[in-house]
Image (spheres, coloured by chain):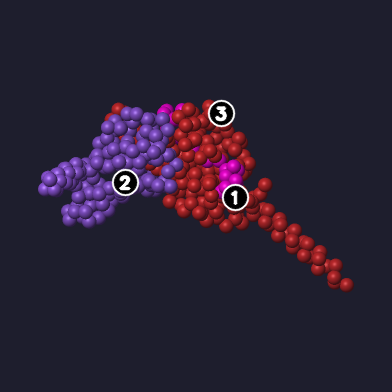
Chain colours: A red, B purple
Amino acid sequence: MKHPRVPRLALFLLALACCLLLAGCQHHEALPFKLTRISGHMPDLQFRLTDDNGKTVTADDYRGKVVLLYFGYTHCPDVCPLTLAHLHVVMQQLGKQADEVRILFVSVDPTRDTPQVLHEYVRAFDKHTVGLTGSAGAIEALTKRYRAAFSREPSGKDGNYEVSHSSAIYVFDRDGHASVLSTPITPQADLVHDLKLLLDSGD
Amino acid sequence: MRRIAILLAGLLVAGLAHADAGTAVKASHAWIRVLPGNLPAGAYVVLHNDGAKPLALTGADTAAYGEAMLHESSATGGVSRMRAIDALPIPAHGTRTLAPGGYHLMLMDAKHPVHPGAKIRITLKFDDGSTLLVDFLARPASALSDKD
Ligand SMILES: [Cu+2]
């Protein structure tokens, strides 16, 4: 009479596997990311800034979306547009799932980057992009939170300046947990791969 | 009559060659990434030196923008920065590429709005005193090269 025991054991093992899988998903330990994993090394997404429509927004407004966080400025003619153009290609490759992703372009040049300037700028790249600006203090706090240093450097005449800034793209899951780090030289396919893992896990 | 035609043809060829002030450099894939408003734009081009002597690109002039600067972007240590450079060497019989994320011309203060599809004339200047007039194709912000 050992028959009833087998299904019970199988059921128990199945339940155990499910628990492990769920727990793993929550902390992304089980997700086979291709990019540099930052879960546990970087804090959850948290900020209070102004979006490109002039509205005050916080990280909570983007809960439920997978978030790509990038620091830049609109007077950056080369690397920032290149990064945003690459991200546009990545979003196209995600197809309909791109609607579940937001690219947050945080200005490290709030003096020149008003919400209006940012609005026109982000619209030129991908419709899932939000431009964020704010007080110098709020922006500095966010860059410090993610160890993304930036500094203003004078250039040319007429008091023009450039801003050197972190080239990293920080990826957060739908709950605002830091997940992986992408860079301008990361293959697009790897970023698409990891975004799909995040989009398909949980919820 | 035929002799005059040949003479005229010869003059025409000489005239065309003269327009580029005898430079050994040929340009291809010239384009500009146009950003909204009057934000600075990056210009990119592939330069080939047909000559037996190394040359260097030293600057650019255009009536379409107030300023054209030779720049290099870098991303060492995870930090993106840009710096002005005085001269960009092009090896003898070699190629030098100005491309996003590296060498570029930074165009500032457009005299008139530049729209994607427009051709912008830029004079490239080299260290041997020669110049090259190049038509750069204006492309949208999300473009990654001179073609789709
Ligand atoms: Cu530049």
Alpha carbon distance from label 3 to label 1: 27 Å
Of the pair A40 and B2, the residue shown nearer to us: B2
Q: Mark 3 sits on what residue?
A: A56
Q: Mark 1 sits on what residue?
A: A198
Task: Check if mark 1 and mark 2 are on a common chain.
Answer: no
Determine the residue positioned at 25% across, 49% down.
Answer: B26
Residue B45, which numbered label? 2
Of the pair A196 and B141, the residue shown nearer to us: B141
How crowded pointer 2 is (Cα within 10 Å; few <14, some 14-19, many 20+) is rated as many
Q: Secondary structure at mark 2?
A: strand
Alpha carbon distance from label 1 to label 2: 38 Å
Q: Chain of mark 3?
A: A
Type of the residue with mark 1: Leu
In which quadrant of the rendered image does the N terminus of chain A lie? bottom right
Q: Chain of mark 1?
A: A
Nearer mark to the viewer, of 1 and 2: 2
Q: Is residue B24 above or below residue A111?
A: below
Look at the image and say whether residue B82 sits in the magenta stretch: no
The residue range painted magenta reads A94-114
Going from N to C along the chain, the mark reached first, 3 or 1, is 3
3 and 1 marks in contact (CB < 8 Å):
no
Q: Is residue B68 above or below residue A158?
A: below
Q: Quadrant of residue B37?
A: top left
Indicate the position of residue B60 as horizontal and vertical percent values. 25, 39
Q: Secondary structure at mark 1?
A: helix
Indicate the position of residue A45 as horizontal and vertical percent values. 56, 40
How crowded pointer 1 is (Cα within 10 Å; few <14, some 14-19, many 20+) is rated as many
